[in-house]
Each structure stands twice: as structure tokens, then as C-alpha cells.
Image (tube, rainbow, N blue to C red):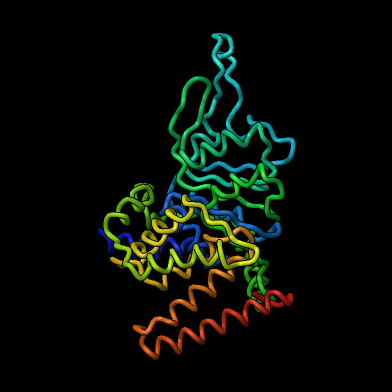
Amino acid sequence: EEEKLVNGVRAASDVLCHGLLEREVEVKLLLLAALTGEHLLLLGPPGTAKSELARRLSKVCHGAYFERLLTRFSVPEELFGPLSMKGLEEDRYQRQIEGYLPTAQVAFVDEIFKANSAILNALLTLLNERLFDNGAERIEVPLLCMVGASNELPESEELDALYDRFLIRRTVSQVSSQGLRDLAQLASSGSTTRQFHTDEEPLSLDDFLRCRDKAIEAVSVPGRVVDLLVGLREYLQDKCEPPVYVSDRRFTKCVTFLQVAAFANGAREVNVYDCLLLQFVLGQRAEDGDKVLDYVLENISSDPGILQNELTLLGLFGRACRVLRSDHHHGGSQ
């Protein structure tokens, strides 16, 4: 059964990537978010396939889909459904939620940080506890994963709690200059405007819903990884300038996230190399991911138990990461 899940994850990754350029990392993070039952935040300019990814996930897992663009003037009805006229006649304050966020399994909310205080409280409870207060009744919602999108990080403290609800964060760039030729070819074949459709079901909705519990049961977290996690949090909070705050909740979710990542890869134990994924989980600003990556690479390479050829490869990998990063910061391709 575990082998079926591993093969299903790989097949789902291939299906989601089909016809998209340079979105392999985003697809894998999206799958990990859904398998962990967490939410993904995509930061970047318009037109970089952010909503397309969420739509594709809903079609791959065959779940109910909800999509909305928020503005500063958005009202709760747009996300949670209109008030029930019949309910008001009977002195009940209830919403008609069918077809809205409280009944969705996969959701995409664009310009998520435009959410105002009228929307915020209900959204926070729905994202974290999968509960929605419909009048006097508190109901469980079937949300598997929300993909939030924004051009920028939140600016007000009021939105910090919403930002924290997204365990995985990824900055999405435009297709690189090297990939533009391939993008033009895709456009000329009509692939960029064709609606995504698949009859394949590499993973069932049940596979997504049960994966986290299975991973916690099956995958162990060795002391070496725990030491790395503890050291990383201390480094980010006490040694970085400015300090990078890591809440207890985010720290514990990191452990589960790594277990799911290992499980989806067919492993029975979290490996220190899995911790490279933490660059997308820990950190408040985009550049914090670089600090996490540097710390993990440094930590792995200082382990005397690592074979010399692994060390050489790691050195090459670290150098490649830094070259790519400097290219990106100087306006080159990512």
C-alpha cells in the first residue's frame, strides 16, 4: 500500500507538471502541502500559473474547488456564502454555504492579504481548525488545502496570524530567459490556453486525507534530525539579525511535514537531507529561506559520519545554490 502511495505521488507530480514550465518545485510543494493537510502560499507577480496549480490539484484529487480574488472591499458573503433569507425569516443568522469556501476541498484565494477584519476571524478558524461558525452552529469543513497568492508580503500586524497559517511559502518567478523559447513553443501549440483535464486518478481524495496519520505512524525521526531542528530554531531566533521567529506550532508542524515528505518518498526514517525542505517552511521573509538552507548545508557537511563523496557532492550543490541565488539577485534567471 505504501509503494502504491509513493508511485501515486510521482504520477500525480507528472500529471500536475504537464504543460507547465519551471514549476516542478511548486508542484512538489503543493503535493506535500495537500498530503500534510497544510496550506501553501505563493508569492509573485501575476501570470505565473499560481491559480492554475490549485485548479490542477482539485482535478487530480477530484475534490470540490473554490476560487476567489479578494479586494480591500470584499465582504464575507464572497467567501462564505450569502445569508439565508429563509433563516432570517425564522430569526436564524445562517449562510447558504453550498458552493462556497466552507464546502470546498481545494481552494485558491488570490490577493489573500487584502482580507479585511470582517473576513479574517472566520478565515483563521477555518484554515487552522477546519471549523466554520454558521450562525449558532459550528460545523466541520472538508478543506484539504488552500493555496493563497499575493504579490507582496503582509504589511500590517493584523495579517501576521493569517500569514502564519500558511506552513509552506514559495516565491514564484517568471519563466527564465532560457525557458522562454520552450514557452513560445507551448503557446504556439495551444497548450497555454487549453483547459487542464485529466481522467487519471494517481491519488484518491482518501489517500490525501489519510497520508499524514500514516506518515506519523510509520516514519521515525532520529536524534540527528531532532538536533538539527533544535539547533536551527536557536540559530534563527538567537543568532540571526534580524531574528527569525519560529513559533512552537510551526516547529511541531515542521516535524510532521518532514515525516510526510519522507513517507511520500518511500522512506521509514526522516533523513537530514529532507531538512533542506525547511527553507520553504521557516522564515518570515524571502531571504530567510537562504539562511535556513545555509544552516542545513553547513550542518550536514560538518557531520563526520558522511562519506567523502557525499561531502563533495554537497559542496557542489551548495555552490550551485549560491550561484543560482546570486544570479537571481542580480536580475538574471533563477
Q: Residue at point 43% right, 33% down?
A: 140
Q: Residue at point 27% right, 55% down?
A: 217
Quadrant location of residue 257? bottom left
Vertical arrangement, residue 315 with respect to residue 151, above or below: below
Q: Position of residue 175 (x, y in %)?
A: 66, 70
Residue in front for this viewpoint, 328 or 232:
232
Query: As drawn, is 74 to the left or to the right of 253?
Result: right
Q: Is residue 19 visible?
A: no
Query: As drawn, is 159 to the left or to the right of 63?
Result: right
Residue in front for this viewpoint, 226 or 81:
226
Residue reaching furthest to the left = 1
Quadrant occupied by the C terminus? bottom right
Query: As drawn, is 211 to the left or to the right of 143?
Result: left
Vertical arrangement, residue 258 with respect to residue 206, above or below: below
Q: Residue at point 37% right, 84% down?
A: 304
Q: Is residue 244 visible?
A: yes
Vertical arrangement, residue 157 with respect to residue 6, above or below: above
Q: Position of residue 278 (x, y in %)?
A: 49, 65
Q: Position of residue 252 (x, y in %)?
A: 42, 54
